Amino acid sequence: MTNEATPATGNGKNLTYRMVAGVVKPFLFMVSTRDWKGTEHFPTDSGFIAAGNHMTNLDPLTFAHFLYDTARPPRILAKSSLWKVPVLRTVLDRTGMIPVQRNTAGAAASLAEAVRQLRAGECVAVFPEGTLTRDPGLWPMAGKTGAARLALSSRVPVIPVAQWGPQLILPQYSKRLSLFPRKKVSMHAGPPVDLDDLYDRPLDAAVLVEATERIMAAITALLEGIRQEEAPTVRYDMRRTVKDVPTEKDPS
C-alpha cells in the first residue's frame, strides 16, 4: 500500500484522498442533506474500526464521506476484484484501501494489513455483513466474522455506524441514480461495542460469533433509532435462508 500520510504524521488527508474527496463531496452535497450524529464517539488518540450496515453500492461513498469529514480518512476493506481495474487500482492503493482476499490464503494477509493500519492510528471501515443485506426490509442481516476477528486481533475500539438514506439515491441492485429532490442521508455513530470480556478468550468460532452479534446488534439499535421502527426479532441469515434475490453485479 502507498500511504502519503497517516494520522501519526499529520492529518492523514493525502493528496489522492483530497482529490477524490474533491469530486465525491460536491456530488453528495448536491444530491443529499446530512443528518450526522454521534461523532463524539470517534477516538482521537488511537486507531479504530468503523463498522456500518450495507444496503446499496452507494454506501461506501456516504460512509467514507461521514468518516472523512468528522474523524479521519478511512481505510476501507474492499473486494480484491476492484484492484483488477487499472486506474481504480491506483486510486485504491494511494488512498490506503485494503483488498480483501475472500476464501483464499490471502485472507490472512488482508487481516494483517488491516491490523497494521489500525496500530498506526488509522480508521479502518468495514461492512460486517460482507455484502448488501438480503433482508427484505433492508435491516442488517447476520454478519460475517471477519470484522470480529479484526477487532479481537487489534483490540482497538469498534464504533458502530448506522446509515439510512443512500438507498433512496441509488436503490439496491440498481444502476439508476435518483438525484432530485435531495434525499436525507442519516449517519449515526454510537459508543464503542463492549468486547473487553472476549479479548483474553481463545479466538474460536463461539467467540467470533458472539463478537459479531454484538457488533451487528449495536448497528441495528442505531438504525432502529433513525427509522423509528423495530427490527425483526430474528436476524436474516444467508447461511440458513434460501431466497430468490437479484444477482449482485456491482462491487460494494
Image: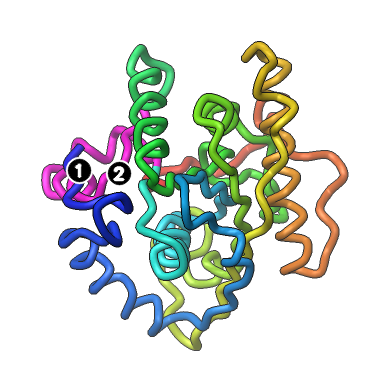
| Frontmost residue, 28 versus 155 | 155
Q: Do the numbered discs 1 and 2 sit on residues whose CB atoms are within 8 Å?
A: yes
**Left or right of residue 67: residue 80:** left
Give me the disc on residue 93. Answer: 1
Q: Assign a secondary structure to mark 2.
A: loop
Alpha carbons under labels 1 and 2: distance apart: 6 Å
Kind of residue at disc 2: Met
Q: Is residue 148 above or below residue 85?
A: above
Give the tally of numbered discs.
2
Query: Residue 35 at x, y = what percent?
Result: 59, 77
Q: Residues within 10 Å of mark 2 (few under 14, many from 20)?
A: many
Query: Residue 159 at x, y = what percent?
Result: 60, 50
| Frontmost residue, 136 versus 200 | 200
Q: Assign a secondary structure to mark 1.
A: helix
| Frontmost residue, 157 versus 8 | 8
- Residue name at image x 72 percent, y 59 percent: 222
Q: Magenta residues, as a range?
A: 77-100
Give me the disc on residue 97. Answer: 2
Q: Is residue 79 magenta?
A: yes
